[in-house]
Image (cartoon, helix red, strand yellow):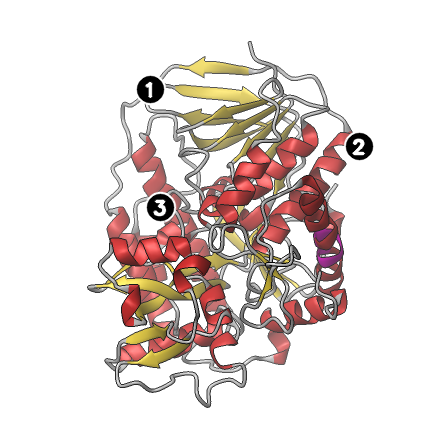
Amino acid sequence: MEKTDIIIVGSGIAALQLARRLQDHYYVRIITKGSIHSGNSYLAQGGIAAPLGLNDTIRSHVENTLEAGRFHGDEDLIHKLIIDGKRMVEMLVEEGAPFDRDVDGQLSLGMEGAHSHNRILHGGGDQTGKYIMKHLLGTLSEEKVTFHEDEMVYELLKDERGRCCGLKSKDKRQTRMYHASHVVLATGGIGGLYPATSNHPAVTGDGMALAFLAGAELADMEFIQFHPTLLTVEGKTRGLISEAVRGEGALLLNDVGERIMEGVDPLMELAPRHIVAECIFRERERGRDVYLDISPIDDFERKFPSITRLCRKHGVPIEDGRIPVSPGCHFIMGGVVTDSVGRTSIPGLYAIGEVACSGVHGANRLASNSLLEGLVYGDRLGDHLIEKGISPTIGCALMPVQEKNALSIPYTEEEIKERMIRHAGIIRDEERLLSHLNWLKEQPLTFERPLDCDSREEIQRYFFWIVSLLVTESALRRTESRGGHIRADYPWEAEAWRKRKLIIQHNQGRLKVGYHEQNETEIYA
């Protein structure tokens, strides 16, 4: 039987950073629903933000992060993130990580929306996630780190004291049960709950559903960032057009040649993402198509090779200088509430990366801070677990597969995706949110039911229902517009909601909602 000390669910940048920090001390098992390469980290076109420029400062990066997050984030945690993040990036540079460089050999630092300095490091132009993931994978020990691909985790296990001590999973043939001293969720966000998304299709909020069912606290589920510029062909989104394209000088025009950001924000195309996304959304609502005018960018194909390939694959000639775009779900700022090292409200359970609500993104994530967060929290949690030590555990056991008496779920994934974009999408209001919430509550589902007898497909639809409910309930209760949460019926920021977190939790089969006025997550032991 293979030895397991720590289980990581998910295989993105946060998971790999944690695994490489732990491998000299523990046996690590990484379980991922798809393949190692089927997550958002591997797809990330944008870069990693760090204040490495000659005239840049940590304070400036902190201020940009607070402003983009509409002052909902925790300033102290953000400051620590930037300090540790700068150190992490410098370490990667020393290791020889493949960051792009200028002709003189200096690191090439790009500009993205809501940043005040050039501080974005890229790899392969617009392939940063792929390059960094390959670098991290190359540092892992095959003897100490075991990967399980195409295996879906569907339940977290707790002992009689309420401590998380393992999980259950399914691959295509059998069901397994694993035990470990510590379980880490690194499953990413919720993009797959919407029909238009930059996310990999496998990213559907599973970690949040797992944590919720286990009784962990979640927060800020209403704050969802819609990326302004997804390639859109014949009404369907086909992939991400990185914000770095606008950072290089691309303009946003409608189909009659008007600059749509004129008079909307002084930063124009480089305004925070929620502002740009809302502007494009409203243009399209009034029947206008929107394009990225890339004609100001010299040598576009060399600077953005993967975007060039994406456009040509879908019949959009780069030579025309116009890329059709529309917004799509990109990043959720909310998730499983954690403290500064990744501990959740359940002992033995941790969360890092996008699945976590760590307090550093506020109401809207600053561009290229997500890979930075993954690196920092993966490293921090590694330090914490090494210092904490582990208890002896057993490995894994096969369980009998029971596919009988499965609950028939009366909706398709496509149906709930379409309802999410219509009722809990970029622009929300009470009528649509309440309509969707009532529809969700009418489904014959509860929070307390065994999942051993269900297929992966049924479990996935069940998890869709849970996460959709959490987002909708939270969006209905926050009666203001802030960052990624835009209410047409409350189109202002309310001082009473500033830094006020909606905490949502499963408690004895019921949905419990409370509030934290400030960041109170350091209490987790």
Precedes in sequence: disc 2 or disc 1: 1
Distance, label 2 to label 3, CA atoms, is 36 Å
Q: Position of residue 455 (x, y in %)?
A: 31, 30
Residue type beneath disc 2: Glu
At mark 2, the secondary structure is helix
Judge depth for marks 1 and 3 and give the one in front.
Answer: 3
Can residue 166 be spotted in the picture? yes
Can residue 238 be spotted in the picture? no
Precedes in sequence: disc 1 or disc 3: 1
Q: Position of residue 59 (x, y in %)?
A: 75, 68
Between 429 and 57, which is closer to the camera in this rendering?
A: 57
- Which residue is denoted by mark 1 in the rendering? 173
Image quarter hosting the C terminus: top right
Residue type beneath disc 1: Arg
Q: Residue at x 40, y 51 (%)?
A: 199
At mark 3, the secondary structure is loop
- Which residue is denoted by mark 2 in the rendering? 387
Q: Which residues are magenta?
A: 81-85
